[in-house]
Amino acid sequence: MNRLIELQNIQAGYGQKPVLKDVNLTVYERDFLGVIGPNGGGKTTLMRVILGLLKPSSGKIQFYQDDQPVSRITIGYLPQYSQIDKKFPISVHEVILSGLYREKPFLRDYTSGQKERVSEVITQMGLEGLEKRQIGELSGGQLQRVLLGRAIVQHPHVVILDEPNTYLDMRFEERLYQLLNEINRESAIILVSHDIGTILQNVKTVACVNETLDYHPDTRVSGQWLEERFGCPIELLGHGHLPHRILGCHHGKNILHRNSGDNQ
């Protein structure tokens, strides 16, 4: 399978504080990679490195197209909900259309084909009738769908989703993963989540980030593998159609606590 992204011996952090140490990772075409790990372990920092928003202090990141080195590839990004300014005066249609800004002709309007693509994504996201609504008037789940639409409208090589389940109702959460499976036929997906059970149910490969990175080529991971990388006991809790992992009692630092009510 052809490579898309290759990270070699990456070290990155903020100021004098290292967050990632000696990270190696390869993302392949049409991969569906789940990234898990404790809070503060470096999941978001890893995504910032891949997106080019944070320059590593050492190591190398290389992109590929048709398995040949290139300077960049197209990446769609769904950020964490908390990073969004809901007061910014912009409509649903304008947000999704902005995902095509790299394709926009210089000093010219978007083409009819590009606008038609936005309309198709609006339908795909179940946002019909909300095209002119300001994002500040949307529910949390509606806004997540708008941002996901923006991430996929350009048909990117890779789609990165940082905690996409936040504020999604259970009905659309199930639809979200159906949709991601459709997107995965053309694009690789990197899904960052603390919801380990949902990750293991839906992705193809798993990376656990806790300063360093441990990669598993499938989702048949054992409880022991998870416990060693999280640094605390982990138990599996079945819950409806999308099971959830919860962490047992422990006394470590920077470990995420999750219970069966967190998805409400």
Image (cartoon, helix red, strand yellow):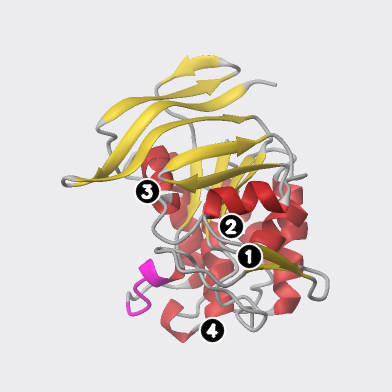
- What secondary structure characterizes most of the magenta part? loop
Q: CA distance from mark 2 to mark 4?
A: 20 Å
Instruction: Between label 1 and label 4, give the one nearer the viewer.
Output: 4
Residue type, numbered disc 1: Ile
Q: Residues within 10 Å of mark 4 (few under 14, many from 20)?
A: few
Drawn side of residue 167 relative to residue 71, left or right: right
Q: Is-magenta flag for residue 84?
A: yes
Q: Earlier in the sequence, mark 2 or mark 4?
A: 2
Q: Which mark is residue 122?
A: 1
Range shown magenta: 82-87
Q: Considering depth in this image, is 18 or 157 the residue closer to the camera?
A: 18
Per the rendering, the mark at residue 45 is 3
Instruction: Tell me how far mark 4 sits from mark 3, CA to CA.
Output: 28 Å
Q: Amino acid at mark 2?
A: Val
Find residue 102 and name its label.
Answer: none
Between marks 4 and 3 in the image, the one whose residue lies nearer the viewer: 3
Element type where label 1 sits in the image = helix
Contact between labelled residues 1 and 2, with CB atoms less than 8 Å apart: yes
Question: Quarter-wise, where is residue 249 in the image?
Answer: bottom right
The vertical placement of 147 against 152, above or below, is: below
Label 1 Cα neighbours within 10 Å, binned few <14 / some 14-19 / many ≥20: many
Q: Secondary structure at mark 2?
A: helix
Name the residue that disc number 4 marks. 139
Q: CA distance from mark 3 to mark 1?
A: 30 Å
Amino acid type of disc 4? Ser
Labels 1 & 4 near each other (Cβ < 8 A): no
Q: State how many labels appear.
A: 4
Report, in whole angstroms, how far the alpha carbon at label 2 lies from the one at label 1: 6 Å
